[in-house]
């Protein structure tokens, strides 16, 4: 398979995960069981934490052969945190199980703000996929084709529950099955778009690849710590979410080590 075909498949895999998850709006009741929602949120958190370490931070450290080895990873990671912090404050959005929107005050529908919240989650994931494939195209030895696909498959796996978690509350808020599916799918389109932009800038990306890998890791960790884990731990039976984190983390770690 040529490089273009391989890249297209790699970019679409996470989007397919979101779409399949959003399709659960056609088959499930209007609301996800709270225990299952906690498990899925924890699972998504575990996958993103493991992906940040094995697929992004460790390659960023391995690529730095001169100077202070940890410096690019540390700078990139902190910049990724700051970037998501800024987005969090400029994009109006609404988290699950809350009634108070975050970001600028806008008269947007609840369904729109829920979708924007998940879209915000997906930006760093799209960047991570784009950066990894940009590194692959550059011939960077520490990034293999199998490793790049391990990341995309891992993100797709955690996108499945994420797609369901966004579409089902929309059903509960009164949206039709088709509309809920559409919003859930739309929330994931930002991933391939962000990845495509990153790949198109490959010539600019390669010299600062360690910084950008760590940047994507920082952005993903921000989402986990700021949003996914607090939502998963809210209320009773928070240990269910902890189990989900463990399962997601181990699965992504196995994927990355086995394929990468």
Image (cartoon, rainbow, N blue to C red):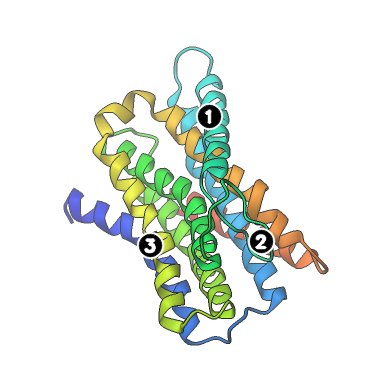
Q: Which of the two labelled residues, at mark 1 and mark 3, occupies the earlier sequence position?
A: 3
What residue is rendered at 72% in x and 55% in y? Answer: 230
As drawn, which residue projects farthest toward the front? Answer: 107
Q: What element carries label 2?
A: helix
Find residue 228 and report its horizontal and vertical position in percent.
64, 56
Task: Identify which residue, 186 or 239, lies in the foreground.
Answer: 186
Mark 1, other Cα within 10 Å: few <14 / some 14–19 / many ≥20: many
Residue 79 — which label?
1
Task: Answer whether labels 3 and 2 touch (C-beta < 8 Å).
Answer: no
Mark 3, other Cα within 10 Å: few <14 / some 14–19 / many ≥20: many
What residue is rendered at 56% in x and 32% in y? Answer: 82
Q: Which of the two labelled residues, at mark 1 and mark 2, occupies the earlier sequence position?
A: 2
Mark 2, other Cα within 10 Å: few <14 / some 14–19 / many ≥20: many
Q: What element carries label 1?
A: helix
Spatial CA span between label 1 and label 2: 25 Å
For residue 10, what is the image quadrant? bottom left
Name the residue tied to disc 2: 42
What residue is rendered at 45% in x and 14% in y? Answer: 66
As drawn, which residue projects farthest toward the left? Answer: 2
Find residue 36 and report its horizontal and vertical position in percent.
67, 75
Spatial CA span between label 1 and label 3: 26 Å
What residue is rendered at 40% in x and 49% in y? Answer: 126
Q: Which of the two labelled residues, at mark 3 and mark 2, occupies the earlier sequence position?
A: 3
Residue 194 — which label?
none
Residue 89 left/right relative to 211: right
Find residue 23 and report its horizontal and vertical position in percent.
44, 78
Badge nearest the viewer, 1 or 2: 1
Name the residue tied to disc 3: 15
As drawn, which residue projects farthest toward the top? Answer: 67
Task: Answer whether labels 1 and 3 touch (C-beta < 8 Å).
Answer: no
């Amino acid at each position: 398979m040529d490089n273009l075909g391989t890249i297209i498949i790699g970019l679409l895999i996470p989007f397919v995960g979101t779409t399949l998850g959003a399709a659960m709006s056609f088959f499930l009741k209007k609301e996800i069981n709270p225990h299952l929602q906690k498990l899925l949120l924890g699972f998504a958190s575990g996958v993103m934490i493991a992906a940040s370490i094995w697929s992004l931070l460790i390659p960023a450290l391995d690529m730095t052969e001169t100077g202070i080895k940890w410096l690019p990873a540390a700078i990139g990671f902190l910049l990724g945190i700051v970037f998501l912090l800024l987005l969090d404050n400029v994009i109006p959005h609404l988290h699950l199980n809350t009634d108070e929107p975050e970001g600028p005050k806008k008269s947007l529908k609840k369904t729109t703000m829920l979708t924007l919240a998940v879209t915000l989650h997906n930006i760093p994931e799209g960047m991570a996929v784009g950066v990894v494939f940009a590194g692959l195209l550059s011939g960077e030895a520490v990034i293999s084709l199998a490793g790049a696909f391990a990341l995309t498959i891992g993100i797709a796996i955690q996108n499945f529950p994420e797609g369901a978690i966004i579409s089902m509350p929309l059903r509960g808020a009164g949206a039709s099955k088709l509309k809920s599916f559409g919003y859930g799918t739309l929330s994931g389109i930002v991933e391939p778009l962000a990845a495509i932009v990153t790949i198109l800038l490959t010539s600019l990306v390669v010299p600062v690849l360690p910084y950008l890998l760590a940047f994507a890791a920082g952005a993903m960790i921000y989402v986990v710590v700021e949003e996914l884990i607090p939502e998963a731990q809210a209320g009773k039976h928070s240990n269910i979410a902890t189990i989900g984190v463990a399962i997601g983390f181990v699965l992504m770690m196995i994927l990355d080590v086995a394929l990468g």
